[in-house]
Image (cartoon, helix red, strand yellow):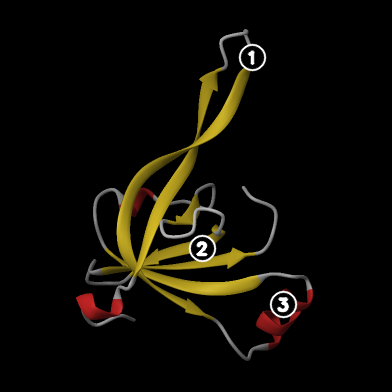
């Protein structure tokens, strides 16, 4: 896990789908940023599961952020978008808070279908 602010080098937008009316009577789900924060973004290496994901064109990442009230509501229905490269997004596969509520560890993948 990250140990200090210096480890949090990536700036990420955390988004969830929000149902909205398109003005023609149709309802669609657009991505809406819930909050933006600094994070540690680490690609995973080595395990058999990681190698299998890479064969499928996916790259698993471990994302570490500071605990906050907004971050505590993250679910697998959300996605992450790189603030410096909006074309780069990550699907969240799991999120867990540490026992002291200082950090949230998120497992995410890039390279798959968005959302």
Between 42 and 83, the one lying in front of the other is: 83
Question: Is 110 rendered above or below residue 19?
Answer: below
**Left or right: 55 with respect to 111?**
right
| Residue 115, x across and y down, in percent | 62, 47
Question: Is 85 rendered above or below residue 19?
Answer: below
**Left or right: 93 with respect to 53?**
left
Measure the alpha-carbon separation of dots 1 and 3.
37 Å
Crowding at dot 1, Cα within 10 Å, few <14 / some 14-19 / many 20+, comes out as: few
Q: Secondary structure at mark 2?
A: strand
Residue at 32%, 52% in the rendered image: 36
Labels 2 and 1: the sequence-earlier one: 1
Q: Secondary structure at mark 1?
A: loop
Measure the alpha-carbon separation of dots 2 and 1.
31 Å
Crowding at dot 2, Cα within 10 Å, few <14 / some 14-19 / many 20+, comes out as: some
**Left or right: 57 with respect to 100?**
right
Q: Which residue is mark 1?
A: 26
What numbered label is drawn on residue 94? Answer: 2
Q: Which residue is mark 3?
A: 54
């Amino acid at each position: 896990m990250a140990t200090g602010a210096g480890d949090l080098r990536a700036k990420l937008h955390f988004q969830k789908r929000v149902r909205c009316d398109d003005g023609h009577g149709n309802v669609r789900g657009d991505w809406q940023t819930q909050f933006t924060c600094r994070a540690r973004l680490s690609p995973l290496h080595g395990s058999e599961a990681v190698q299998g994901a890479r064969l499928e064109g996916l790259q698993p990442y471990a994302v570490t952020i500071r605990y906050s009230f907004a971050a505590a509501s993250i679910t697998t229905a959300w996605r992450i978008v790189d603030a410096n490269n909006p074309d780069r997004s990550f699907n969240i596969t799991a999120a867990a808070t540490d026992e002291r509520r200082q950090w949230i560890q998120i497992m995410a993948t890039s390279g798959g279908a968005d959302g």
